[in-house]
Amino acid sequence: MENEPVVSLQDSVMAQCPGAAALAVSDEMLEITAQSLVHTEVAEHYQVIRELGRGKYGHVVLVTHRQRGTPMALKLLPKAHTKLHTFLYEYCVALSLATHPAIIGMFGIAIESSQHYGFLYEPALHRDLISIIKPRVRDGIPEPAAKQCAKQLVSALEFIHSRGLVYRDVKPENVLLFDPECRRIKLTDFGLTRPKGTRLKLVAGVIPYTAPELSNTTSAQGLPIDASLDAWAFGVMLFCLLTGYFPWEQSLPADPFFEDFMLWQESGLDEDLPRHWRRLTAEATRMLRSLLVLDPAQRSPVSGALHYVDSLSSSSCQIPHRCQFPLSTDFPADTNPPGYRSTLAADSPIGATSPRPCVDPLQAPVLPEALIQQWKPIPSPQLPHPDPDKGKSHCCGEHIPLEQFLCSAATALLQK
């Protein structure tokens, strides 16, 4: 008699109800992390260089370790407005997902100061996806680059979904760049990530990425979430990458752009294709239409984008794409700054899911002091409405770009 495979209780539960298993695992991690939380003031061990971004719930700063000089991104959440459980949950979710090559790496350090909760993760020196979409210009990034981004994001989102989680925050600001050609990108910010099946009773505002089933929900018990929400937001984000603007302001019939889209989705006729969709290639249009099906039960999973990605020829994959930053400097955008050495594999295969440990602080890159001292801020770009004549511009977020970190300083060093 052949030996039957041994299946653990956790694997069995995960297979039947991945959301419940994810919730049980996260609760266990929360308890352990709460006991090992480091109590310290940020200034004792880290030098704050500058603010990288600020949002509704907290802000992110670039810091260096005072003894080792290791650069790190530190996310800080004010204790006055943040419950300990909320902070620990986001940290534990991020830590549990950090093994994927297309998800931000974690240092495995969570701290509590007198004013903040915080955790450390690897900094990205080439900003985020929103920064490479030309502001107020009807043009997105080149399609080959969009396909490379899509392939990596599909891998990251599928990894999240396989853990019984729904990401719930797909947007360009949460996709960090690790090279100027957009070949290596990583997903970040897991504050909204929840186990599959979690019921959302209240939607705080309808934004372009909000799926129509959430925009119109009236159930007193709330809507149980699943991966189809990420598929919808992923489709909206890909539209932004390919065109440079949102397809609509809100996924509601009252929005004329969304109303036109609904008409086309229902009829399927070429003559009903919305005007601002006609610049897309036929394959991109088919891919977006499958991701943006109005009925979540019929909506394509994020992996449906792979058919679109695979249409990219192997020869065109090798053509470098330099991201067009809306910024003019003398710093060469296609090179890492002097003195910076990335310890993460630059040739990591896109879509690979082999585990990797948290970032090792002893092996992380060290930045020269001269570069750090000359970092200057620049404004964040905005993503325009589909038709600037019909609606006002909307800012995708308040994330402050990163690549200016080294622009002026690197230029000075290169001149020397």
Image (cartoon, rainbow, N blue to C red):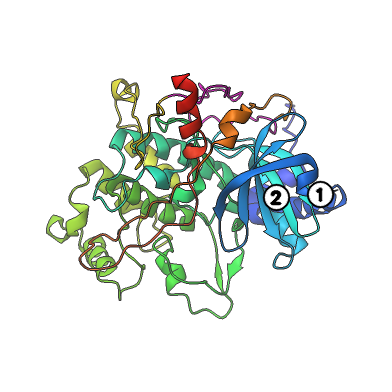
Residue marked by disc 1: 33
Q: What amino acid does circle 1 point to? A: Thr
Residue marked by disc 2: 91
Q: Give how far across and how far down residue 286 sits, in percent.
A: 27, 47
Residue 348 is left or right of residue 122, and the answer is: left
What's the magenta region? 335-359
Per the image, label 2 sits on a secondary structure element best described as: helix
Among the two numbered marks 2 and 1 on one chain, the one whose residue lies closer to the N terminus: 1
Could you tell me which residue is drawn at 83 percent across and 49 percent down? 40
Per the image, label 1 sits on a secondary structure element best described as: helix
- Which of the image's four quarters has the N terminus? top right
Could you tell me which residue is drawn at 30 percent across and 32 percent down? 311
- Nearest the camera: 41 or 330? 330
Q: Residue lying farthest right?
A: 35
- Mark 2 nearby-residue class (10 Å; few <14, some 14–19, many ≥20): many
Residue 391 is left or right of residue 238, and the answer is: left
Q: Give how far across and how far down residue 318 sits, in percent.
A: 34, 21
Q: Give how far across and how far down residue 175 sits, in percent.
A: 49, 44
Magenta residues, dominant SS class: loop
- Mark 1 nearby-residue class (10 Å; few <14, some 14–19, many ≥20): some
Q: Residue lying farthest front?
A: 416
Which quadrant would residue 266 be assigned to in this image? bottom left
Question: Is 341 covered by the magenta stretch?
Answer: yes
The mark total stands at: 2
Question: Is 400 covered by the magenta stretch?
Answer: no
Residue 164 visible, this orientation: no
- Distance Cα–Cα, label 2 vs label 1: 9 Å
Which quadrant would residue 55 be assigned to in this image? bottom right
Residue 3 is left or right of residue 230, and the answer is: right
Asked if marks 2 and 1 touch (Cβ < 8 Å), the reply is: yes
